[in-house]
């Protein structure tokens, strides 16, 4: 099992919405001392979600 270690330097994360539903959710990235989360401002109702796809790259 992977043991979490605090980041020595917070990484840079590039997030790209790859579907209309993902873009409509207004995504953002939250970086804490030991992990990265993809979060959304506008959770979409189930009927409107469709394909929710994100592309991301973590550097650092």
Image: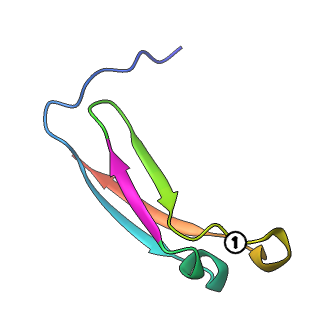
Q: From the viewer's side, name the closer residue of 8 and 22.
A: 22
Q: Is residue 30 magenta?
A: yes
**Rendering coords of residue 27 (x, y %):** 48, 68
For image coordinates 23% across by 47% down, the residue present is 11
* Mark 1 nearby-residue class (10 Å; few <14, some 14–19, many ≥20): some
Q: From the viewer's side, name the closer residue of 30 and 56.
A: 30
Q: Is residue 56 magenta?
A: no
Magenta segment main secondary structure = strand
- Which quarter of the picture shows residue 56? bottom left
Instruction: Answer left or right for 34 relative to 12.
Output: right
| Residue that carries the numbered disc 1 in the rendered image | 44
**Rendering coords of residue 47 (x, y %):** 86, 76
Q: Count the marks.
A: 1
In terms of secondary structure, where does tag 1 sit?
A: loop
Instruction: Answer left or right for 30 relative to 10.
Output: right
Image: 38 above or below 10:
below
For image coordinates 38% across by 57% down, the residue present is 29
Image: 54 above or below 38:
below
Q: From the viewer's side, name the closer residue of 60 and 23.
A: 23
Q: From the viewer's side, name the closer residue of 6 and 30.
A: 30
Q: Residue furthest bottom?
A: 20
Q: Residue furthest left?
A: 9
For image coordinates 63% across by 69% down, the residue present is 53
- Which quarter of the picture shows residue 12? bottom left
**Rendering coords of residue 59 (x, y %):** 26, 52
Instruction: Answer left or right for 28 relative to 23.
Output: left
Instruction: Answer left or right for 1 relative to 56.
Output: right
**Rendering coords of residue 26 (x, y %):** 49, 75
The type of colouring in the image is rainbow
Picture quarter with the N terminus = top right
The span shown in magenta is 27-31
- Which quarter of the picture shows residue 7? top left
């Amino acid at each position: 099992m992977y043991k979490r270690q605090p980041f020595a330097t917070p990484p840079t994360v590039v997030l790209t919405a790859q579907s209309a539903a993902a873009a409509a959710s207004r995504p953002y990235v939250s970086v804490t001392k030991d992990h990265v989360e993809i979060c959304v401002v506008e959770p979409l109702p189930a009927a409107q979600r469709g394909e929710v796809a994100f592309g991301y790259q973590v550097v650092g």
